[in-house]
Image (tube, helix red, strand yellow):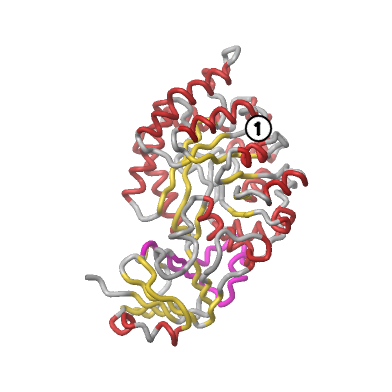
Amino acid sequence: MPRPILITGSAELLTLRGSSPRRGRELRELGLIRDGALLIEDDRIAAVGTRKAVLRHPLARRARKIDVEGRVVLPGFVDSHTHLVCAASRAAEYEHRIGGATYEQIARAGGGIVNSVKRLRSAAPESLEARAMWALEEFARHGTTTIEAKSGYGLNAESELKTLRLHRKLAARQPVEIVSTFLGAHVVPPEYRKRENGADDYVKFLATRLIPRVADEGLAEFCDVYCERGAFNMKQSRTVLIAGDRCGLVPRIHAEQLSRSGAARLAIEMKAASADHLEHVNTADIRALAKSGVVATLLPGCCFHLGEKHYAPARELIDAGTIVALATDYNPGTSPTLSMSMILSLACTQLRMTPAEAICAATINAAHSLRRAGRHGSLEVGKFADLAVFDVADYREIPYYFGVNLCVLTMKRGKVVHSRAPMDVG
């Protein structure tokens, strides 16, 4: 039987203990313990508190000790919006945008999501797997222990199922937890665009054939849709989400990214787990979201990479009482980052969130949006021992040092999955 693990020597231990999800002022409550300690038995947290208190626990005497030597310990990041499986970068489009082309202009010219669709359909499964494995290793190196992964670059039965099955395979091959989402309604695929009623025909195919098959095989927990001009309108998006809901797939939605479509209200109507992006919500939308259980998942990496000046109104959302989460939106076209620390930096400088709010949004609230707050997102007795150690003495330095990976240790379910700093282990 493996020995328990005792983690001591933290300058600050951020437990995030308490209510879930966090709203308003609660979003600043980190449950910070100075000189904190954590005791792990098997894959769960057995004790957490001050070093003096935890050392009195019966298991502490025989535990293997890890001294983090004055660093900050916090829950592993929960990245609740990623497009994990993709075939290649879209660096050429990046250069075109720098030259003045807009995201929508590039999409109309055959770039954007359709570009990724063409590449994924023709890619060998082995290359997709290798690229995704690299990404998962990078997530762990940056302190992320759980991710949501969407399909959506296949847009036909064969390639969507290939992606979702790869999620399952990857989840079994490596330690980062993968929560799978079906995003067959990402955009209208090229072969349907040639039809007079192509978008409606494709939505019917998703609702009557592909979504039931995804559900029958247990390949996804959530069903997402991109409700936006150039993608799917409100009626089509509602049809997709209702079909998913009837098959047991919890709704999620890409909402109000490039324009105000009404998607945030659709998220509320459908009792969606999350409405993501929200750059173009208005005051009435914010009030409605604040009264709902929908998580507003903000993706500042996307605005940053696209060079957009109009970020989501995080302050207004938080002050109104909305449940706010943060995610990377890792994808090859609009947010090719795996670093939640960089997202925290953007949240602080561009969204005007405090460092504490950003950390809560990237851990416990993100876990809530994935229906996993009961076992992830905070360091509390009985939860999985998912944590990250950062080489700073003050948690505010994590977003302060933007673009720098200061994560020196990541642990998933009580096992070290990344380590790059010598620590006293006894």
Quadrant containing the N terminus in the rendered view: bottom left
Residue 11 within the magenta-colored segment of the rendering = no
Secondary structure of residue under mark 1: loop
* In-front residue for pair 108/384: 384
Look at the image and say whether residue 388 sits in the magenta stretch: yes
Would you identify the image quadrant in which residue 188 lies?
Answer: top right
Q: Which residue is mark 1?
A: 228
Residue 380 picture location, percent across and down: 45, 69
Classify 239 as above or below 335: above
Q: Residue at x 51, y 71 (%)?
A: 15
Q: Magenta region: which residues?
A: 387-413
Instruction: Examine the rendered structure and indicate whether residue 198 appears above or below residue 32.
Output: above
Residue 96 occupies quadrant = top right
Amino acid carrying label 1: it is: Glu
Instruction: Out of 142 and 319, give the one closest to the viewer.
Output: 319
Characterize the local packing of mark 1: few (<14), some (14-19) or many (20 or more) Cα atoms within 10 angstroms.
many
Q: In the image, is residue 326 above or below residue 379?
A: above
Q: Where is residue 192 shown, x and y percent of the image?
A: 54, 18
Query: Which residue is located at x 43 percent, y 26 percent?
Result: 210
Residue 284 in sight: yes
Residue drawn at the location 67% of the way across and 50% of the way down: 291
Give the quadrant of residue 345: bottom right
Which residue occupies the foreground of this view, 296 or 11?
Answer: 296
Question: Is residue 350 in view from this perspective?
Answer: no
**Front residue of this view, candidates 334 and 325:** 325
Quadrant assignment for the C terminus: bottom left
Question: Residue 354, how many percent across, how many down?
Answer: 68, 65
Seen as rendered, the residue at the extreme right is: 283
Where residue 408 sits in the image (x, y, percent)?
Answer: 46, 68
